[in-house]
Amino acid sequence: MTKARQKLKLAIIAGEPSGDLLGADLIAALGMHVEHPIELVGVGGDAMKAAGLKSLFDYHDLSIIGISAIVAQLPKLIMHIRRTTRAIIAAQPDVLVIIDSPAFTHRVARNIRKAMPNVLIVNYVCPTVWAWKPERAPAMTGYIDHVLSVFPFEAELVARLGGPPLTYVGHRLAGDAALQDVSNLQALKPSAAKENDDGTIAPAPLCLIMPGSRRGELKRLLPAFAETAHLLAERMPGVRFHIPTLPRLEAEVRSVAASWSVPVEVTATDEEKWQAFARADAALAASGTVLLELALGKIPCVSAYKLDFLANLIIKRVTVWSVALPNLIADYPAINEYINESLRPGLIARRLERLMQETTERRQMLMEFEKVRAVMRTERAPAEISADVIIDLLATKAADT
């Protein structure tokens, strides 16, 4: 590859583990276009640090979700916004890339636009302007030059709302090797409680329980998920349950699961998670990116969520017809969603029972999941496409000045 630039100063900020991985991939891909090592400034986690970034502070401070959490962390958030703004201005980068965590990253971007009107600012992972507060889309044009989108439905919606130019670059999960292995194994796995071709009986059905990655989500969802598991076990004797969680939440999840009326296995490593995915017959999951993992892994699932107090006050402002990403990508309500008062364990248990057997509902859902994978497919890795877009934008900006 011919190097497009000799040097590149990159300011990059990410506030969550998923954004940290995207940022690390992007740094590596941009490095293929530059003669000398990229000069980095910004905020990130272990993956971006391994790529050469010295994070300005611990990015876990930004891992907040929900209106209540943002309000509670507001003083610390403001401090980090100011510190990050000063560091980026001092570095005078060629481009600022902000990744997810809009409560933090977009405030920094607006500050940088005021201080450095000519710097290129790219938003990797579009805010959910198509879900709520659509007025954010045209507002972004004042400080965002281009959006790198990870969902194929966003281009049309953001354009319709009057947002910045946008390129769909693909989602890293669509090319994830572990998820592809899960998908392949699921295609070969016999259905639950079904006799194999050799006359042996398939293992007892396995239901994944995935209550989220934040303590607030655990507190709101685990009681209802426990009751659902109890009712499902009554209807399907022998059914097994498995909660894949994170190391930092493992002790809390184990403590809660110990009081359940049914046995449940709790694990906290990626390897154990993907092994559980490969064996699973269905899943009960909190609304979020995990639904996309399940869809790409061909695991039928049910989505459930309970909002915090302040989020409940603004739920009427949500404009999107579904909050399950696979539904939006397939443009079809493949996954049933149970939110707040509709989260009824008896109803969910019966839905899971149907999904864990060879039924029309299961076959229909798996067919829609195939569509999700097909729609998300890109010819190259998201980071490679993103790097090309950024290098082209920098070349255009240089030619115009």
Image (cartoon, grey):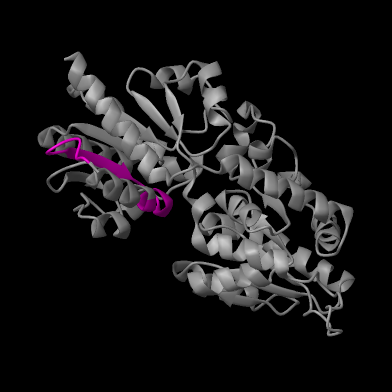
Magenta region includes residue 15: yes
Work out whether 56 lies above or below 234.
Answer: above
The one of 288 and 186 positioned closer to us in this rendering: 186
First to last magenta residue range: 2-21
> On the rendered image, what quadrant is the C terminus found in?
top left
Vertical order, 380 against 51 (above or below) = above
Q: Is residue 264 visible?
A: yes
Quarter occupied by residue 227: bottom right
Where residue 105 sits in the image (x, y, percent)? Answer: 34, 37
Residue 388 is a magenta residue? no
Question: Going 72% across and 68% down the picture, which residue do you hit?
Answer: 188
Indicate left or right for 125 with 48 as reference.
right
Q: Is residue 32 left or right of residue 236?
A: left
- Residue under the point 80% across and 53% down: 344
Question: Residue sitting at 18 percent across and 31 percent down?
Answer: 94
Would you say residue 73 is visible in this rendering?
no
Q: Is residue 3 left or right of residue 287?
A: left
On-image quarter of the N terminus: top left
State the image coordinates of residue 231 (x, y, percent, origin top left): 83, 67
Is 265 placed above or below 31 here?
Answer: below
Q: Quadrant of residue 182?
A: bottom right
Which residue is at the front of the view, 98 or 211? Answer: 98
- Relative image position of residue 371 (x, y in whole percent): 68, 44
- Residue at (85%, 52%) from the top-left corner? 361
